[in-house]
Every structure is written in structure tokens, then in C-alpha cells.
Amino acid sequence: MLTSAPNLLRVQRALTRPAQRAYHDVVTLPSSKPVISSGPPGYSAVSGHRVTVFGCTGFLGRYLVSKLGKLGTQVIVPYRDEDEARLLKPMGDLGQIVRMEWDIRNENQIAECLRHSDIVINLVGRDYETKNFNYSDVHVDGAERIASLAAKNGVSRFIQVSHLNASLNSPSKFYATKAEGEERVKAAFPTATIVRPGTLFGYEDKLLTNMAVWPIWWKLNHGETKIRPVHVMDVAQALANLVFVPQLAGTINLPGPSTLTYEYLLELVSSVTLQPSSRAPVLPKAVASALAKASQAVWWPSLSPDEVQRRYMDDSDVVGDWDVVGIQPAEIEEYAITYLRRYRSADNFVRPVVFPPRPSIAIN
Ligand SMILES: NC(=O)c1ccc[n+]([C@@H]2O[C@H](COP(=O)([O-])OP(=O)(O)OC[C@H]3O[C@@H](n4cnc5c(N)ncnc54)[C@H](OP(=O)(O)O)[C@@H]3O)[C@@H](O)[C@H]2O)c1
């Protein structure tokens, strides 16, 4: 029995030998760098691509890194706070997730982060201004700096994540700077792909979870503001799919499948969490803005005056480009219980879900 063991091992190895590489495993990028894939599909594969994800430590970034890691792509994850990047490490096979410290104003560090990559994805963005960074520093100068360094270092593809409502003429500084950032990126990296997602929902979102805790701030405009929420997983998968599209200059809009009002979403949160609807009053815009302005004195993130302005703005009604990225976006009701169950009381924890009727505003 012992003597046959090596033979059995040889048979086993022959059976499980990875498939031979073929010509289709080699892709030559416009920069002449070859991308060679190998190995079995999945976590232990080697897709051959090397992607730097700026803004990887945020809500969308974590899901994107996880999806890229599962495809066997080496991901460079620039971080400011080491603890924020620690959870990204097991999202890929050994050596596939590479952490590097960076500062958005430090060109050497940015260049170091993207020097060996063939794709750069920029997710950096902030909903509010801080004493160190205003919207322009992050969305305009930061994006331009990354794009021009990517172009200078021979990166083949640049993907800039903007916002569905980005517009140069927007009364919201956040949306206006997002649009200005897009223009600067296109000037620095002409073949860049601009991705414009709608408001994201998911575990760490600032939509459903915030509505469950702070309904008063979602009653502004009498809850009549219309948005097109989109599942964070769908946007992360769309970005991961883009890695395998050789070139795609232009803008891709990724709104959610339905247009819904804040009022409906508040009802949805209340029915799913089995908590009574909020009786908070509807604040006039001037009062909400003044409160938001006063709250900027605290040192933790609070609702900014620009966010109050955004609560009065409907989402853009452009057509979604989901077919380009090969995804069918999910409806918010499909996942509401997953993200909201934690707001149920212990008595109601396992009760069935009953959705409120959808208002006539819903397009789909
Ligand atoms: N969430 C949405 O509903 C939504 C909708 C449409 C578009 N978007 C856009 O999608 C992108 C990702 O959104 P998200 O929800 O994942 O945002 P997020 O959770 O706020 O994460 C933002 C990321 O940007 C980084 N960042 C912010 N300011 C920075 C600075 N001054 N220097 C260096 N890094 C900085 C953060 O790094 P730290 O962890 O170090 O702070 C973090 O990694 C953003 O551009 C956002 O505008 C979001």
C-alpha cells in the first residue's frame, strides 16, 4: 500500500493539472504591456490585471476590492488609516491585495501606488467638507492629479467614479465639483471612463440606515424629492466587469431601476423595521440649512448645508447604461430586509416583511 502512494499522487496530479495556457490568455494593452491570465477560475486565479483603487477604504471601495480579489486580480489599495485597509487584506489570495499609504496631495505617493498598474479606478469622494479638504480639493484637484499621474506612468485605463447628478451648473457644490472633476480627468486622461452611479444602498449606506435613525432629515421638501437608489453590489460588479472591457471612453450612467420618493422610502423603512412612522415635523429649508450650518462646529461628521440642498434635488432622469456593463440592477425592496433587520426589536426580529404599496411616481 505504501509503495503505491507515490503513483497515486502522480495520477492525482495529472488529473488536477491546470489547463494549458492558450493565446487567448494573453492580452496586449495599448501601452504594449502584456496581461497574462493563468490558474483556475476564482480567488486563486491570476487575471493578469493589476488595478489601483483609490478610495478603496470607503463603502463602495470595499465591495469593489472584494469582487476584484475574487477574479484573481492584483489590487493596490492606497490607504490613509491602516486600520481602514486591514479588512481588505483577506479579500484576495496571498500577495494579491497590496496596501500602500498615500496622501491625495503627495504626487510621489500617488505615482508609487499606480506605477505598476494597468488600470486605475478613482472612487475618492466626500459628502461633506472638512477643515483640511474642501469639495474642490478632493473631487477636482485630487481627481486631476491622479489622472495626470496615471497618464504619465503609462496606465492603460482610468475609471473615474462621479455621481448621477454631476452638473457644472448645479446649486449643490458637491455635484458641481464632481462635474468639474470629470472635465479635468477627461483633459488629463482622454480615454477615461466616467461612471455616474445613483445613490447607493447597502449595509453601510447613508440612505436606508440613515432613514431608520434620522427620519427628520429625510422629510425635507415634504419627502417629495425623487431618487433612483441603486444596490452597491451592482455598482461594484459593474466596475469589476469594466476591468475586462479593453477601452470605453465616455460616460456610463448607473441609476437604480426605479424612481422613488423619500416619502415612500421612509414608509418602506418603517414597514420593514416594524417601527412606527416618524412624527417629526417637516423643517423649512431655511431652518434645516441653519441647523446644518451650526452643526459644522462639532468635530464629527454631521449633515452639511450642501447635503440639505441636495435633499431638495431630484435625481437626473437619464437612461441607465446597465447593458454596457452586463448587469440587471436590483430593486431596493429585494434587499431592504437584509440591511434593515437590525433596526427591528427582538420581538419582531423574524416577522415576515410587508411592503407598503408603491406610489404612482415609480416609473418601473
Ligand atoms: N454613496 C453613494 O450613495 C454614492 C452615490 C453616487 C456616487 N458616489 C461616489 O462613489 C464614490 C465612493 O462612494 P462611497 O460611498 O464609497 O464614499 P465613502 O464611503 O465616503 O468613501 C470615500 C473614499 O474616499 C476617500 N477619501 C475621501 N476624502 C479623501 C481625502 N481627502 N484624501 C484621501 N482619500 C479620501 C476615503 O478614504 P478614508 O477612508 O481614508 O477616509 C474613502 O476611501 C465617491 O466618489 C462618491 O462620491 C457615492
Image (spheres, rainbow, N blue to C red):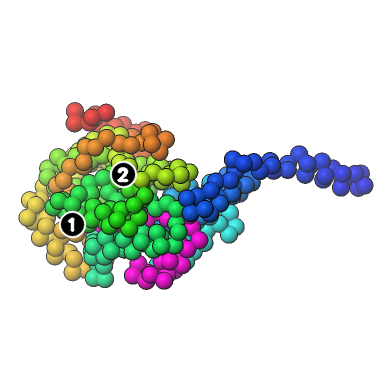
Residue 285, image x and y in percent? Answer: 9, 52
Dot 1 lies on which element?
helix
* Residue type marked 1: Lys
Q: Is residue 220 left or right of residue 85?
A: left
* Residue type marked 2: Thr
CA separation, marks 1 and 2?
A: 21 Å
> Which disc number belongs to residue 173?
1
Residue 103, image x and y in percent? Answer: 37, 69
Mark 1 neighbour class, 10 Å CA radius: few under 14, some 14 to 19, many 20 or more: many
> Which disc number belongs to residue 251?
2
Q: Tell me if residue 289 comes above or below residue 132 in the rendering.
A: above
At 19% from the left and 54% from the top, the residue drawn is 176
The image quadrant that residue 107 belongs to is bottom left
Q: Is residue 116 magenta?
A: yes
Q: Is residue 268 magenta?
A: no
At 82% from the left and 44% from the top, the residue drawn is 10
Q: Is residue 204 left or right of residue 299?
A: right
Residue 97, image x and y in percent? Answer: 52, 58
Dot 2 lies on which element?
strand
Q: Observer-nearest residue: 321 or 151?
A: 151
Q: Observer-nearest residue: 199 or 117?
A: 117
At 45% from the left and 53% from the top, the residue drawn is 156
Quadrant of the image containing the N terminus: top right
Q: Is residue 311 left or right of residue 250?
A: left
At 23% from the left and 29% from the top, the residue drawn is 363
**For disc 2, does the CB lie below 8 Å from ligand 1?**
no
Residue 233, image x and y in percent? Answer: 40, 43
Q: Is residue 128 visible?
A: yes
For discs 1 and 2, the disc positioned in front in the rendered view: 2
Q: Observer-nearest residue: 248 or 39?
A: 248
The image quadrant that residue 230 belongs to is top left
- Magenta range is 101-127
